[in-house]
Amino acid sequence: MTNWPLIACLISLLCLFGSPSVAQDGETIITPEEFETLSQSKTLFFYRDGQIYGAEQFFKGRQSTWKFADGECDRGIWFPKGDQICFQYQANPGTQCWHFLKTKDGFSARFLGNEPSLDLKLRTINRAELICDYPDLNS
């Protein structure tokens, strides 16, 4: 005898908690191609809880420079992994994957890692150059 209410409950829980990649109501995951169009040759400024979190300048060849709000910079590359946008930086050898989302208010980025609910709001997109001090360029 099948216990349908229990099975339905388990399926609901799996749908709710099984995949952190699911966009929430009113959000659409943008494709890596859309992300490339949005970001190439531009600088994106991200905020968290109303405060500047950092900015990332994107270059051809999927290269980038990330600058935290405190001024620390890091060079990186990005690459698609399914519908995720993944980054690798020189100072941090691990891979960081995100979903970039179209929301009712613009765009946001959702980290797909161990830190729960690290959502960044994309507030500004322009062509500003990030000024970073790279010791290897100063020699």
Image (cartoon, rainbow, N blue to C red):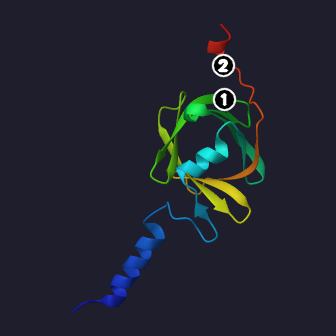
Q: Which of disc 1 and disc 2 is earlier in sequence?
A: 1
In the rendered image, which quarter is residue 14 located in?
bottom left
The residue nearer to you, when weighing 59 against 74, is 59
Q: Is residue 135 above or below residue 15?
A: above
Disc on res. 5:
none
Q: Which residue in the rendered view is the most extreme toward the left? A: 1
Counting from the top left corner in percent of width and height, residue 129 is at 75, 30
Residue 138: % across, % down: 68, 11
Q: Which residue is mark 1?
A: 73
Q: Looking at the picture, how far across and down is residue 81, in whole percent?
A: 45, 48
Q: Residues within 10 Å of mark 2 (few under 14, many from 20)?
A: few
Report the residue at 48% width, 72% height from top.
Answer: 16
Tell me where residue 55 sits by quadrant: top right
Pointer 2 and pointer 1: residues touching (CB < 8 Å)?
Answer: yes
Compared to 117, does 139 lie above or below? above
Q: Quadrant of the N terminus?
A: bottom left
Q: Callout 2: helix, strand or loop?
A: loop
Three-letter code for the amino acid on which mark 1 is drawn: Cys
- Mark 1: give few (<14), some (14-19) or many (20+) Cα within 10 Å: many
Direction from residue 97 to residue 65 in the image, left or right: right
Q: Pointer 2: what residue? A: 134
55 shown above or below 3: above
Name the residue rendered at 70%, 20% in the picture. Answer: 133
- How far is mark 2 from mark 1, CA to CA? 8 Å
Q: Nearer the viewer, residue 123 or 41?
A: 41
Which quadrant of the rendered structure holds the C terminus?
top right
